[in-house]
Image: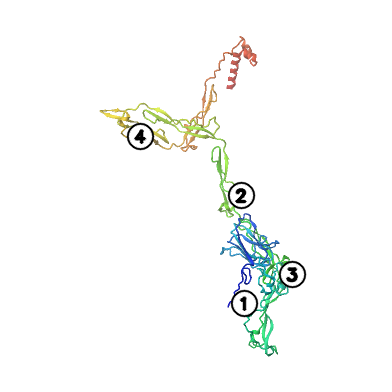
């Protein structure tokens, strides 16, 4: 038959989720959830609060990440992963219970970190996440006592170690001082004045079925041999509370000499009970945590680790005050680190010329991220905030625009009859000089002009004459030919109206032609306004050598370059005759000689003489 949780044969009682033997799961409540909040700031973020009295605690990261779980008491004492130092996986005491901290293998496992504890807790605990990358989700679950309360009458029938409403009656130590270590020793030896006495295994009476008849034992006086304690086993530890057991041998009652165990009744041999030994605490030691990640991915950074003073007692490692480790040299908690030398930005070329000859354009230069070995690496390897500009605007000054055109072609497009001559016209910016030129505007100069080489002679039927020469010596042009409707007679051809040949397909009379690339040619603007209206001024124009794609060139023949400046308005200046400007006196020459023309009266009275002298003086000054 099976044994129930109450240690009775044939019992079907089991421990419910609240930890009560034969319970109905109503004495407690399961609290669970998933923390999925999106976090932005790096550092510690509170996840969940574990209340006092919680049992079966499970805090698990849903998948592996670079984040860490942390545990702290409400009083502010760090239990696991505090003060930016990462503890090693292991068992840590806090809140009256023992937490198991697990961190699966970082290479072969995809599981996340976890805190596990049986409880119950004797104070409120806070669970945090050290946020470094997106939160994969944290699952939490614990059990707290419900509203049902066990009456005091049930305490007399409570089995040793059995939970009461989900909480163990045995108090646990949370302090790290010697007095707490001694208190724990007292509890384990049954000397504590706690709420419930702790009964060692085997010290409480076992239940026997009522129908079982006790075996008859011979009287003590009739036994010649009995069991005697002759010593104890070696203590399991040299310090920090170990365990040992008494050793019983079969001896003669009178002589106390050891005899084979077969002489004694095996059913009367005492069961060895565990006894505490070497209760004094072990020497304190420095527990060194793992180094945190380097604060910088390249260059000199810092890393931290947690250093705790610890003592081992009763197979548990407790955190104690640091003065207990003063006999040992404390390891460093911070250290410099350098994963690699940082890459740096290098300017490989000078600025290029501006992309436009005038106006606002751009110029560029080559900027690369170079490693400490001189290799070009991705830009992300360098600090993007320090990247020099590789493109910037450049201002080449305002642009002026003018029409540039070539000379008329020498050939007419038709050998006879009406044809055309052509030239090239292009609007370009003027950035060479500040000539008095107007903008291009909408008055585009004509590219063709009519020409006529005389009447054409009559031909035959739809008669197509030979193609004329190309309208341009180079580049794209046109060719024309005469197409007429004629009738052949004896020795003659009669020209007919075109409609007489309308039923026939008429040959084309014009086609495009291209002899050769023009290469570079001289282009010039229109002449500017003459600088003077008479007595010889000058006018100017801009001349440029341009290639087929209208780019500046130096391949033009200098001897064919058109003039850039020529005289204009060379005629003499003729003063306007004012009929009202006359001499009123016959001796006005005396006024002129006396230089009295500067006065208004004489300038009016001798207007003609004074005006004539003034014109001569202005002409003299102009020739100077």
Viewer-nearest of discs 3 and 4: 3
Q: Quadrant of residue 577?
A: top right
Give the labeled residue for mark 2.
385
Sequence order check, earlier mark of 3 and 1: 1
Q: Nearer the viewer, residue 12 or 330?
A: 12
Q: Is residue 90 something one can see in this rendering?
A: no
Give the labeled residue for mark 1.
8
Question: At which x and y percent is residue 220?
Answer: 69, 88
Question: At which x and y percent is residue 581?
Answer: 59, 13
Sequence order check, earlier mark of 3 and 4: 3
Q: In the current view of this chain or complex, which residue is farthest to the top? A: 586
Q: CA distance from mark 2 to mark 3?
A: 58 Å
Horizontal side of 441 relative to 117 (left or right) equals left
Q: Quadrant of residue 417?
A: top left
Viewer-nearest of discs 4 and 1: 1
Question: At which x and y percent is residue 588?
Answer: 62, 11
Sequence order check, earlier mark of 4 and 2: 2
Q: Nearer the viewer, residue 162 or 458?
A: 162
The answer to whether marks 3 and 4 mark residues whose Cβ atoms lie closer than 8 Å is no
The answer to whether marks 4 and 1 mark residues whose Cβ atoms lie closer than 8 Å is no
Horizontal side of 280 relative to 36 (left or right) equals right
Q: CA distance from mark 3 to mark 4?
A: 121 Å
Give the labeled residue for mark 4.
508
Q: Quadrant of the N terminus?
A: bottom right
């Amino acid at each position: 038959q099976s044994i129930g949780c109450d240690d009775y044969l044939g019992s079907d009682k089991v421990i419910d989720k609240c930890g009560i033997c034969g319970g109905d799961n109503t004495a407690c409540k399961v609290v669970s959830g998933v923390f999925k909040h999106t976090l932005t700031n790096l550092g510690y973020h509170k996840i969940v609060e574990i209340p006092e009295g919680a049992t079966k605690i499970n805090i698990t990261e849903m998948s592996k990440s670079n984040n860490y779980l942390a545990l702290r008491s409400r009083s502010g004492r760090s239990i696991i992963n505090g003060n930016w130092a990462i503890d090693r996986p292991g068992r840590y005491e806090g809140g009256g219970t023992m937490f198991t901290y697990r961190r699966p293998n970082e290479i072969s496992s995809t599981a996340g970190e976890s805190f596990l504890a049986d409880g119950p807790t004797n104070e409120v605990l806070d669970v945090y996440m050290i946020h470094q990358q997106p939160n994969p989700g944290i699952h939490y679950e614990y059990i707290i006592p419900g509203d049902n309360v066990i009456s005091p009458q049930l305490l007399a029938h409570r089995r040793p170690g059995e939970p009461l409403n989900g909480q163990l009656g045995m108090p646990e130590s949370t302090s790290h001082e010697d007095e707490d270590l001694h208190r724990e020793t007292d509890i384990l030896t049954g000397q504590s004045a706690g709420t419930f006495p702790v009964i060692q295994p085997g010290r409480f009476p076992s239940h026997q079925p009522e129908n079982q008849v006790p075996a008859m034992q011979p009287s003590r006086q009739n036994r010649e041999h009995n069991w005697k304690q002759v010593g104890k086993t070696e203590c399991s530890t040299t310090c920090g509370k170990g365990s040992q057991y008494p050793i019983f041998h079969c001896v003669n009652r009178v002589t106390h000499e050891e005899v084979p165990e077969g002489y004694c009744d095996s059913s009367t041999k005492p069961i060895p009970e565990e006894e505490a030994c070497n209760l004094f605490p072990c020497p304190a030691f420095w527990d060194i945590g793992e180094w945190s990640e380097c604060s910088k991915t390249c260059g000199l950074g810092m890393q931290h680790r947690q250093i705790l003073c610890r003592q081992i007692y009763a197979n548990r490692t407790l955190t104690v005050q640091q003065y207990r480790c003063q006999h040992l040299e404390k390891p460093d908690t911070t250290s410099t680190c350098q994963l690699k030398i940082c890459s740096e930005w290098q300017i490989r070329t000078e600025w290029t010329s501006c992309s436009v000859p005038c106006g606002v354009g751009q110029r560029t230069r080559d900027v690369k991220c170079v490693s400490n070995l001189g290799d070009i690496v991705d830009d992300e390897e360098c600090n993007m905030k320090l990247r020099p500009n590789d493109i910037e605007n450049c201002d080449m000054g305002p642009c002026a625009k003018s029409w540039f055109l070539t000379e008329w072609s020498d050939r007419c497009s038709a050998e006879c009859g009406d044809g055309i001559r052509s030239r090239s016209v292009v609007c370009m910016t003027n950035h060479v000089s500040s000539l008095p030129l107007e903008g291009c505007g909408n008055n585009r100069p004509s590219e063709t002009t009519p020409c006529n080489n005389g009447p054409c002679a009559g031909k035959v039927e739809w008669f197509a004459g030979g193609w004329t020469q190309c309208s341009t010596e180079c580049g794209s042009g046109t060719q024309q030919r005469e197409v007429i409707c004629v009738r052949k007679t004896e020795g003659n051809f009669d020209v007919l109206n075109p409609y007489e040949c309308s039923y026939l397909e008429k040959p084309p009379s014009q086609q495009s032609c291209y002899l050769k690339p023009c290469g570079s040619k001289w282009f010039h603007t229109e002449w500017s306004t003459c600088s003077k209206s008479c007595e010889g001024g000058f006018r100017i124009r801009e001349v440029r050598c341009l290639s087929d794609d209208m780019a500046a060139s130096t391949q033009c023949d200098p001897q064919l370059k058109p003039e850039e400046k020529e005289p204009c308005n060379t005629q003499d200046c003729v003063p306007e005759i004012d009929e009202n400007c006359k001499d009123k006196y016959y001796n006005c020459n005396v006024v002129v000689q006396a230089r009295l023309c500067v006065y208004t009266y004489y300038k009016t009275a001798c207007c003609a003489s004074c005006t004539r002298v003034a014109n001569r003086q202005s002409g003299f000054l102009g020739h100077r």
